[in-house]
Amino acid sequence: MIENRELTKEEFDYLVENTSDMDVINDTEKRFDYFKDNAVEQFGILINGLPIYWAGLVKNKDRHELWTIPNKDIKQQFSLYKICKKTWLNWADKYEKIYAYVRKSNNTILNWAIRMGAEVINDDNLITLCLIGG
């Protein structure tokens, strides 16, 4: 069964401990509260009760920035892609532009974001991507 909803602290922490790419706040106790208090949008995906993905949108000055945490062992790629793309595009329509930052060395996440419709707007060691709403 697939669920698309906000994650509990326990589900969020489980996902953080089981991700292969973690650029989120290092302090374990503060990261859930940071996103709970600062995310203007967020959602998680669970399959059979197991968290496989979380995304949050945080307003930072004049930009809406996308943060994601994927489980390192996602086997349901199509379901994840379908739900994420729909949500990301809805957020882009609502907020006009969404920015994401990806390390140049992280080809998996970079390719994933481009496949979702994001465009590279700055190609440096930290690549800036932008998803523009319709």
Image (tube, rainbow, N blue to C red):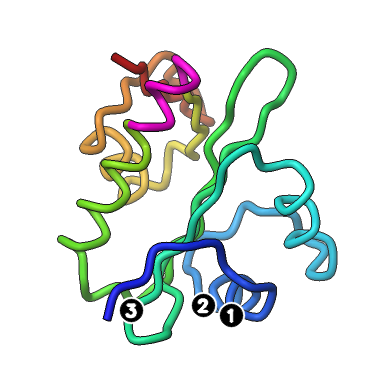
Determine whether label 1 and label 2 are within 8 Å by CB: yes
Residue at 39% of width from left, 63% of height from top? 4
Q: Earlier in the sequence, mark 3 or mark 2?
A: 2
Q: Is residue 85 above or below residue 14?
A: above
Boundaries of the magenta span: 90-97
Residue 44, given in percent of the width and then of the height, sits at 47, 62
- Residue at the disc numbered 2: 18
> Is 62 part of what is drawn in magenta?
no
34, 26: nearer the viewer: 34
Asked whether the beta carbons under mark 1 and mark 3 sit within 8 Å of each other, the answer is no
**Amino acid found under the numbered disc labelled 2:** Asn
Quadrant of the image for the C terminus? top left
Circle number at residue 14: 1
- Quadrant assignment, res 40: top right
Compared across the picture, whether 65 is left or right of 53 comes to: right
62 displayed left or right of 93:
right
Q: Give the residue displayed 71% in from the left and 25% down from the top.
A: 60
Q: Which mark is residue 47?
A: 3
Mark 2 element type: loop
Which residue does the image show at 74% across and 54% down from the upper left?
25
Q: Amino acid at mark 3?
A: Ile
Residue 94 magenta-drawn?
yes
Quick check: 4 above or below 8?
Answer: above
Find the distance from the CA under tag 3 to the CA under tag 2: 15 Å
